[in-house]
Image (cartoon, helix red, strand yellow):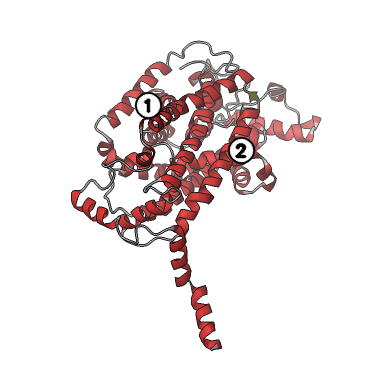
Amino acid sequence: MVSTYFNVIIAYSLMFFFESLTMKALPWSLCGNWWNTENCLDYNNASIYESYMRYRSWERNHSAVDYEDIFSSFVNRTIRSPSEEYFNNRVLNISSGIDNMGGLVNHLIPCLFASWLITATCLIKGVKSSGKVVYFTAIFPYFLLTVLLVRGVTLEGATTGIMYYVKPNFTRLVEPRVWSDAAFQVFFSLGPGWGGLITMGSYNRFDNNCLRDSYILPMIMELTSFFAGFVVFSVIGFMAHVTGKKIEEVVAEGPGLAFVTYPEVVSRMPMSQLWAALFFFMVLTVGVDSVGGMYLLHLVDQYCAFLTVVIICFIELISFAWIYGIKAIFTGAERILSDFEFMIGKSLSPFWPVFWRFATTAVVVAIFFVSVFQYSAELKMGDDYRYPAWSIALGWCISCSSLVLIFVYMIWKLYDTPGETLRQPTKRWGPANPTIRMEWEAYKNTTKYKQTLKQRLHKFYQRSPLQKYREQMSRTAV
């Protein structure tokens, strides 16, 4: 279901990419097009930009001596950037709300078809066919983001945007929405519960060091998001400086943020069409309708892509941390830890089962209830648009629709499978290599494999510096 709406975002990227290559000038860099309104400020035009900045200065000082006739063209205008109007009015042809869906946007139909075609082409031969491409798609975004950052920090007002980004506002920590959005970012960037990690991991060597990967990958992903934030907020700071708005009022949250801020900085670079084409080509490689589509996209993104994944992660935690492996329930975490030790060839900390069984489960449950509270109360896109009650109910129906099949299958398996067998992996479960499988079967009968959590913690304590210190003190006292 996620791929169904995520391809819409790829379709937007395709349109930007196509027009970067075919238009004489980037269409989101200028006003005066049929989709622009009287609020559009062409601040890539030096004379208009300088006049507007003089108007801003006059507006602050209210000096009649410095008044110019051109200032009358700026009075009572809600200034918008060319990139914002291009995305909302040209690409989306956005409506007033989700209750006004309208018809199809004709120019997005071939883009959406092409995005599905690209997705099918990448997956038709399985994930191995895209393995070599990843070397390029994983490195190229860092190069391009660095180029955009260098240009972004040179814009007027960039420092204000960056300081807004890095300066903490601790009062926001009491808001459930902040924690919900942070969890959404982690779930979306790391991918737990989506199935992609399991699918891609199945192509690894059996002895791949998954412990090392569990440290490196989250660090890389979150640092990348943090780095990209500097690019976004340097441009938002510039747009706030030009339009006279507050930072939080410049661009609404959601997918539109990237399709307004990044094109904005690209349009202000030398050889802007080349950089625009490269940027949206990057979006296509990384990512590998209707008038009211953006509202529907945001609705589905919030309910389908997050709440469902949290529930799936909770079910996975219960399955492997409490049930997996042997007849005795509540020992799954110890058994899967033993399997990890067999795979990577070294002993692991006994605190991993504690984290899986208690800490991680508690965090996931807390995230779920905070999110339910948040999404039941209201849903907004930006600060201006609030979703009507019926659309929130629709969002919950979308979220539940993807969960129904999970519970239907679970109920059927509970009915069809004997209780003892239900808690056991199938006979096919285990290493695919026959030699490794024989070693694993023998390892399962050892005392080390069958250690309980209590036994593991006791051994850990016996080897700890605290226990050695106590033993030394006891010998000294004697």
Badge 2 crowding class, 10 Å Cα cut-off, few under 14, some 14 to 19, many 20 or more, is some
Q: Residue at x 48, y 49 (%)?
A: 223
Is disc 2 placed on a helix, strand or loop?
Answer: helix
Residue 435 in the figure: left or right of residue 317:
left
**Mark 1 = which residue?**
21
Residue 217 in the figure: left or right of residue 162:
left
Q: Nearer the viewer, residue 410 or 52?
A: 410
Residue extending farthest to the top is 103
Q: CA distance from mark 1 to mark 2?
A: 45 Å
Q: Nearer the viewer, residue 132 or 403?
A: 403
Q: Is residue 26 visible?
A: no
Is disc 1 placed on a helix, strand or loop?
Answer: helix
Residue 7's image quarter? top left
Residue 426 x, y percent position in the rendering: 30, 40
Mark sitting on residue 11: none
Badge 1 crowding class, 10 Å Cα cut-off, few under 14, some 14 to 19, many 20 or more, is some
Question: In this rendering, which labeled residue sits more in front, label 1 or label 2?
Answer: 2
Which amino acid type corresponds to the residue marked 1 in the rendered image?
Leu
Q: Residue at x 52, y 73 (%)?
A: 466
Q: Residue at x 60, y 33 (%)?
A: 372
Residue 250 x, y percent position in the rendering: 62, 32
Q: Is residue 5 visible?
A: yes
Mark sitting on residue 370: 2
Residue 379 in the figure: left or right of residue 231:
right
